[in-house]
Image (tube, coloured by chain):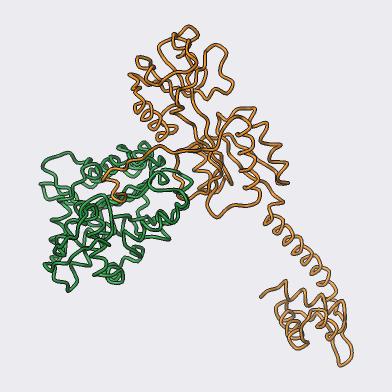
Chain colours: A orange, B green
């Protein structure tokens, strides 16, 4: 039985002590109201009201139960109001993931940028793309900031922002003489890259792009820690990729000519689970990363799908 | 154990994948990785189509003409310029061996999606449904990508996230387990002998077959490809009589059209599963 509805009717009758007035207040007719009270009495197994032709009065049980009913109904009101606030994205918390290499300055800017847009509490976790995808899938994360590529088939995406990559070179390397470096000029140097297991698709994409532009490193060092990567560069014989935001002082950063390599980043959340707080977070991410120099993705390369693609002629 | 190795192989290749492998002669022996998850069939839909054709009353030697309004594609009649007259069985041969969209759609126009779905229901496959032809899901891709232009738009992850053709709810769909059931039917039923012969002549070497680089092992298969989607279903036959149906459905993280590792992992995953079954 819909106990709360019947209790609401009982409350009206108890306050009016008159079925006609109670029915009018509830915008219903009297017979269904009487039936409702009878059903409630049957459900609870006690008489709540004494009624004769002219009077309605609360029984002792009715008086005590009325007090409890008021508490329950007030609880229902609070519950519904709270749900309403969640529905409009004004309450609760938003669980968001950001990649470990986002940088302290970006994280510091993200919190106030979100707070300006949403009253919801923001709970940030620092986790990589693969782990964010798992957390979004098992609903332990509401929204993430993900580095491409990843399977987008079940996600909605915010604007895709790009940051062009350059290289870190030792101070005394001849390539530092020019304002930029061609990928093909790096032949003979080893490449320092993040461990393949942390993002296999991106790792392969970087190496494919290097090959496309004439650089096939003889050796790829997998470095998880930026300090270790820097060490390999400073030791000579290797270059590391870097987005040029606050490069380490010991090395020299040079952009790559033609910006062949880009990190692409966007906010992402499971499709159909966009709330105002998610929108506010995606907008805050765009604001912060744009201020940090990232740009909206633009332009595409010519693409020549091969016959094995089966679907494009 | 095997399932974990298959999953690790998918992850290492930058894809998420589903697989079902089953011993044709001992169907209780199987390997399953997400075998009951809904997947997009892409050109794998041509397999239930030709099964339905071979159970129909159509005379397979009858010749029909495909005019210039036929479906297009990079291979077979779909890539040709002039009208082509060909028998139904030769159209089936092109639809399977080179994934000819024009040939497949011409057959679909004859057989109809209702008959294909009836064939699937007769096999008690309720999660595999064919709702449209190759030209129809090609059209939805162009519509959903607009105003961006094909083919470049099909490497843009934002565009891909809105394509109905990549969503099992809105296109030809199935499960890995359902597709090995279709393969078992093909390998058991006399009507389907020509399909076994044709699938063994598929030209693509880069997916299922790449996992079995052994001259004495026969691989018969049918691929399916759409942006980020790479599939193949097929049967692997060893000279000792061992026969295994395998269905692999993958989605790549990268949106590049050319991803040799994502193609090859279909073969690697299939071999891991078949090794377990042997």
Residue lying at 68% horizontally and 41% vertically, measured from the top left = A114
* Farthest top residue in view: A172
Does A119 appear above or below A33?
above
**Does residue B244 appear in the picture of this structure?**
no
Q: Which of A126 and A79 is in front in this view?
A: A126
- Left or right of A197, for residue A43: right
- Left or right of A178, for residue A84: right
Q: In which quarter of the image is residue B176?
A: bottom left
**Residue A299 at x, y = what percent?**
47, 38
- Left or right of B96, for residue A130: right
- Left or right of B269, for residue B240: left
**Residue A81 at x, y = what percent?**
74, 60
Q: Nearer the viewer, residue A101 or A130?
A: A101
Does B230 appear above or below A178?
below
Residue lying at 86% horizontally and 79% vertically, measured from the top left = A58
Image quadrant holding the N terminus of chain B, namely top left
Q: Quadrant of residue B174?
A: bottom left
**Does residue A118 appear in the picture of this structure?**
yes
Q: Quadrant of residue A215?
A: top left
**Residue A46 at x, y = what percent?**
76, 79
Q: How many numbered discs, if any?
A: 0
Residue lying at 39% horizontally and 17% vertically, measured from the top left = A186
**Residue B210 at x, y = what percent?**
22, 40
Q: Nearer the viewer, residue A84 or A103?
A: A103
């Amino acid at each position: 039985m819909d106990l709360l509805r019947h209790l609401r009717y009982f409350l009206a009758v108890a306050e009016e002590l008159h079925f006609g007035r109670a029915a009018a207040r509830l915008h219903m007719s009297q017979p269904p109201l009487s039936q409702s009270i009878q059903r409630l009495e049957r459900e609870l197994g006690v008489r709540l009201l004494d009624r004769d032709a002219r009077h309605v009065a609360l029984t002792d049980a009715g008086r005590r139960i009325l007090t409890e009913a008021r508490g329950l109904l007030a609880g229902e009101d609070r519950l519904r109001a709270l749900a309403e606030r969640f529905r409009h994205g004004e309450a609760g918390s938003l669980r968001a993931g950001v990649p470990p290499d986002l940088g302290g300055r970006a994280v510091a800017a993200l919190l106030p940028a979100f707070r300006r847009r949403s009253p919801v509490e923001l709970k940030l976790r620092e986790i990589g793309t693969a782990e964010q995808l798992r957390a979004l899938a098992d609903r332990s994360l509401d929204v993430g900031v993900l580095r491409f590529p990843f399977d987008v088939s079940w996600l909605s995406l915010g604007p895709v922002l790009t940051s062009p990559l350059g290289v870190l070179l030792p101070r005394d390397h001849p390539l530092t003489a020019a304002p930029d470096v061609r990928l093909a000029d790096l032949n003979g140097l080893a490449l320092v890259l993040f461990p393949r297991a942390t993002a296999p698709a991106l790792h392969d994409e970087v190496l494919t792009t290097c090959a496309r532009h004439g650089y096939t490193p003889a050796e790829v060092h997998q470095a998880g820690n930026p300090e270790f990567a820097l060490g390999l560069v400073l030791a000579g014989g290797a270059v590391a990729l870097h987005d040029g935001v606050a490069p380490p002082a010991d090395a020299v950063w040079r952009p790559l000519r033609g910006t062949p390599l880009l990190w692409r980043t966007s906010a992402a959340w499971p499709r159909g689970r966009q709330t105002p707080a998610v929108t506010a977070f995606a907008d805050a991410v765009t604001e912060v990363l744009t201020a940090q120099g990232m740009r909206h993705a633009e332009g595409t390369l010519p693409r020549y799908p091969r016959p094995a693609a089966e679907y494009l002629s | 154990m095997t399932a974990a190795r298959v999953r690790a192989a998918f992850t290492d290749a930058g894809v998420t994948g589903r697989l079902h492998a089953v011993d044709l002669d001992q169907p209780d022996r199987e390997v399953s990785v997400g075998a009951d998850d809904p997947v997009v069939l892409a050109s794998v839909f041509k397999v239930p189509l030709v099964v339905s054709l071979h159970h129909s009353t159509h005379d397979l030697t009858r010749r029909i003409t495909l005019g210039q309004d036929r479906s297009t594609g990079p291979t077979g009649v779909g890539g040709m310029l002039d009208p082509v007259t060909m028998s139904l069985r030769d159209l089936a041969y092109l639809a399977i061996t080179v994934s000819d969209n024009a040939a497949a759609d011409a057959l679909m126009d004859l057989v109809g999606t209702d008959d294909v779905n009836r064939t699937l229901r007769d096999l008690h496959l309720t999660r595999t449904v064919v709702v449209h032809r190759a030209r129809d899901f090609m059209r939805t891709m162009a519509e959903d990508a607009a105003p961006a232009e094909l083919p470049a738009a099909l490497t843009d992850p934002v565009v891909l996230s809105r394509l109905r053709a990549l969503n099992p709810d809105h296109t030809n769909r199935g499960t890995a387990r359902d597709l090995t059931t279709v393969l078992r039917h093909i390998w058991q039923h006399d009507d389907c002998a020509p399909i076994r012969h044709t699938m063994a002549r598929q030209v693509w070497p880069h997916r299922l077959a790449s996992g079995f680089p052994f001259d004495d092992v026969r691989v018969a298969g049918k691929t399916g490809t759409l942006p980020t989607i790479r599939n193949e279903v097929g049967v692997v036959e060893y000279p000792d009589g061992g026969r295994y149906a395998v269905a692999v459905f993958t989605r790549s993280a990268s949106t590049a059209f050319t991803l040799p590792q994502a193609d090859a992992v279909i073969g690697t995953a299939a071999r891991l599963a078949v090794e377990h079954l042997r």
